[in-house]
Amino acid sequence: GLIKRTAIREYSNINVSGLIAINLVDGDELVAVRTTDGEADIILATHEGQAIRFNEADVRDTGRATQGVIGIRLREDDYVVSLAVVAEKDKDHAKLLAVSERGFGKKTELAEYPLQGRGGLGVITLRVTERVGNLVSLYPVLGGEELFVLSEGGVLIRTNEDQVSTYGRSSQGVTIMRLDEGDRVVSANV
């Protein structure tokens, strides 16, 4: 549940051998990297369907080779699956698109996510059940984006985000991808 903010100038001398972007401890993984406008809202979402929204100013700048700070506190066996960034100019009309392991999806108004300080447990973003499965991804959408959903069995679908209905945070959503028995969604991107 850690997050860090580093000035882009720290990455100006990248060469073929690369640069260390973050210090990871055993068991940690880098989930995502995003460019921000300095005033963006950050949303971290977890496998168990929790999400937290906070302003990027709550994350102090640190150098490349640091761990960062707590973005969201995790319950036992939960982990972060998505990092969404909503620019200042888009906050009034952005929605968050959630996709689950069992092919369910929904959009929710950004306004339904309270702006909190970083480091809390967050709020529910998807009602995780055996039928719906766990959260795979949470992406901001403004309208017109294409959604690509990939299953573990190698099935890929492409649809427009406007084909996914808008629901409240604690709902399950609707089927956006039909899966064979034993298959599950492993990736969804806009």
Image (tube, rainbow, N blue to C red):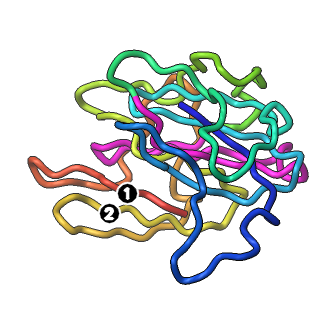
Residue 138 location (% of width, % of height): 53, 45
Q: Is residue 182 above or below residue 162?
A: above
Give me the residue at 86% from left, 43% from top.
92
Tell me the quadrant of the picture where the C terminus can be found.
Answer: bottom right
Residue 169 location (% of width, % of height): 57, 27
N-term-proximal mark, 1 vs 2: 2
> Mark 1: few, some, or many residues within 10 Å (few <14, many ≥20)?
some
Residue 28 location (% of width, % of height): 41, 39
Disc 2 is placed on an element classified as strand
Task: From the image, tell me which residue sits under label 2.
Answer: 150
Q: Residue furthest bottom?
A: 16
Question: Gap between marks 1 and 2, in whole Å?
Answer: 5 Å
Q: Residue furthest left?
A: 181
Residue 138 relative to residue 59: left or right = left
Give me the residue at 63% from left, 50% from top.
65
> Per the image, is 86 magenta?
yes
> Per the image, is 89 magenta?
yes
Residue 134 relative to residue 89: left or right = left
Q: Is residue 101 above or below residue 123?
A: below
Residue span colored magenta? 79-108
Relative to the observer, which residue lies in front, 39 or 6? 6
Give me the residue at 53% from left, 31% from top.
1
Residue 186 location (% of width, % of height): 31, 53
Numbered circle sitting on residue 187:
1
Residue 139 relative to residue 159: left or right = right
Relative to the observer, which residue lies in front, 17 or 175? 17
Amino acid carrying mark 2 in the image:
Leu
What secondary structure do most residues of the magenta stretch adopt?
strand
Amino acid carrying mark 1 in the image:
Ser
Given contact means CB atoms under 8 Å apart, are the residues at marks 1 and 2 in contact? yes
Give me the residue at 54% from left, 83% from top.
16
Disc 1 is placed on an element classified as strand
